Image: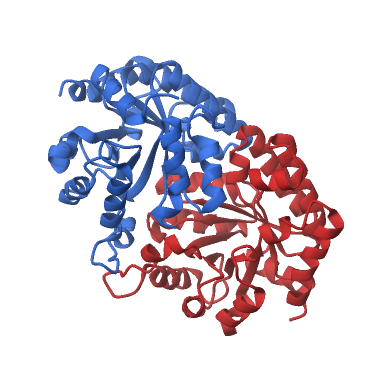
Chain colours: A red, B blue
């Protein structure tokens, strides 16, 4: 069994940078790189981005939807991309936002989480609409496989706020209760259950982070969605040490030239490494 | 472009039965059928179930997770299963509970919804945790491709209730607001946006159904999860005509013998057809 995900992340964050670079080969990104919108374009995008970015950062995050849209052949590229990320000693976090109940949740673990799964992810994202407790089997798998599971708690898109801030019977918001339940499930140290918290939430981000002091915080939305690393550092305050800052389009749009791509990754990764 | 999904469903419901039979080839189900837990077992399960059930019902619903866990080769079986369902004139609803924002939502439509998508589903399920409005691009695709999108509104598992009943700022519950928003998006007739509402919710189910009089209602949890068709008929009352009753394990456990399987499907499908 690999070491627990949080330990592996911490070691890489120290050695390299805590940065997470997204692999988002959307139709738009393939076009911008002069690639065909098909499996060969998909493969070229992923190979080029991983070759440049993976050695410089702790985590890369392929977005599953952009592989799913190319059918089974696209999923073969996802599997190869995870392997290519890991060959550089980098953690592969599969962004699939799965969520269900019972045997279906177990199947999502079989698909994406750990060295015995089909896609061998080091970590994956999940969606909590059917209740955090329904995700129990995947948390168990994360523990037994040394993997990480990142629950979408509070997204940065404006459409998500009303639902995520709705009030539970006891007066906590949906996001607050999820944060508390993650903290309870993780135990005394930084545990396998992390949270996705958007980069554009201001003080709310820090308050949520404070409720789960034993959870890693995946923070997407840096770059193209308008937040800077400095914003994230300010908003998360003392909890910033547990943040995995994630950038996708902000890197990809510097490509496809490898030197320009490398410069874009280094520009974000190096100041983070120094802190 | 195919006719709109609700029209196609209504015609088949009249001709055959409104029943939806789930295709849930879990590790457990493969074992129960004496099949190996690999791609060949997966393929055999799907072929046998579809051959018997598809000609008798309006809809079949493959659960994506059970294909994802077999890697890209499993996804090829999902693609073939959708095609096999459609060859029997039956609608294929891919249960994947995807949910995201922006270009990622568009990619999920490219993957699963309509004749130009990778898996060619007639319909798919989505999860609303990032906000219903964030799913707009997939609703647009459903309209243009004659497809259906079923939003998980209220699940039957006990772990989901607290979140789904949380109160929005205006006093409506999360589920109620989703139902209202679906009704607003569907327009004057039964529209492409349906709702998933669990089969074990009692009066709450009918009240939610009343808020979206222009939406189809996919109702899973019949059989193995404890509810009967009679319960659903009582709980949904005058809205029962828009219900797509869905059964999965309750059928699969009658297999693998084709005659026993057929009998199990007919036992559920025929009384529905008669009403």
Total tally of numbered discs in the picture: 0
Relative to A25, does residue A175 appear above or below in the rendering?
below
| Front-lying residue, A199 or B259 | A199
- Residue A139 seen from this side: yes
| x and y percentages locating residue A88 in the rendered image | 80, 56
Residue found at the very far right of the displayed protein: A259
Q: Residue at x 29, y 66 (%)?
A: B168
Residue found at the very far bottom of the displayed protein: A238
Relative to A110, does residue B14 appear above or below in the rendering?
above
Q: Residue at x 36, y 20 (%)?
A: B53
Q: Determine which quarter of the picture holds residue B272.
A: top left
Q: Residue at x 56, y 45 (%)?
A: A110
Left/right placement of residue B254 relative to residue B50 reads left
| Front-lying residue, A109 or A36 | A36
| x and y percentages locating residue A227 in the rendered image | 60, 71
Quick one: quadrant of the N terminus of chain A?
bottom right
Quick one: quadrant of the C terminus of chain A?
bottom right
| x and y percentages locating residue A32 in the rendered image | 72, 47
| Front-lying residue, B163 or A21 | A21
- Residue A2 seen from this side: no
Q: Determine which quarter of the picture holds residue B21.
A: top left
Q: Residue at x 48, y 20 (%)?
A: B84
Left/right placement of residue B23 relative to residue A156 reads left
| x and y percentages locating residue B57 in the rendered image | 31, 22
């Amino acid at each position: 069994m690999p070491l627990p995900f949080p330990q592996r992340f911490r070691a890489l964050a120290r050695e390299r940078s805590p940065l997470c670079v997204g692999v988002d080969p959307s139709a738009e990104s393939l076009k911008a790189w002069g690639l065909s919108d098909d499996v060969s374009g998909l493969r070229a995008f992923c190979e080029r981005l991983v070759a440049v970015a993976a050695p410089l950062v702790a985590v890369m995050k392929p977005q599953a939807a952009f592989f799913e849209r190319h059918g089974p052949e696209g999923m073969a590229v996802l599997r190869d991309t995870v392997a290519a990320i890991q060959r550089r000693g980098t953690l592969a976090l599969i962004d699939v936002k799965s969520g269900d109940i019972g045997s279906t949740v177990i199947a999502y673990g079989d698909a994406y989480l750990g060295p015995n799964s089909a896609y061998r992810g080091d970590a994956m994202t999940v969606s909590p609409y059917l209740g955090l407790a329904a995700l129990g089997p995947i948390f168990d798998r994360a523990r037994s496989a040394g993997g990480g599971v990142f629950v979408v708690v509070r997204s940065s898109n404006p459409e998500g706020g009303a639902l995520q801030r709705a009030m539970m019977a006891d007066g906590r918001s949906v996001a607050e209760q999820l944060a508390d339940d993650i903290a309870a499930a993780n135990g005394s140290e930084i545990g396998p259950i992390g949270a996705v918290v958007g980069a554009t939430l201001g003080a709310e981000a820090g308050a949520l982070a404070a409720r789960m002091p034993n959870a890693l915080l995946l923070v997407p939305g840096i770059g193209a969605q308008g937040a800077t690393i400095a914003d994230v550092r300010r908003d998360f305050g003392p909890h910033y040490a547990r943040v995995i800052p994630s950038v996708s389009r902000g890197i990809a749009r510097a490509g496809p030239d490898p030197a320009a791509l490398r410069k874009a990754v280094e520009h974000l990764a190096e100041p983070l490494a120094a802190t």
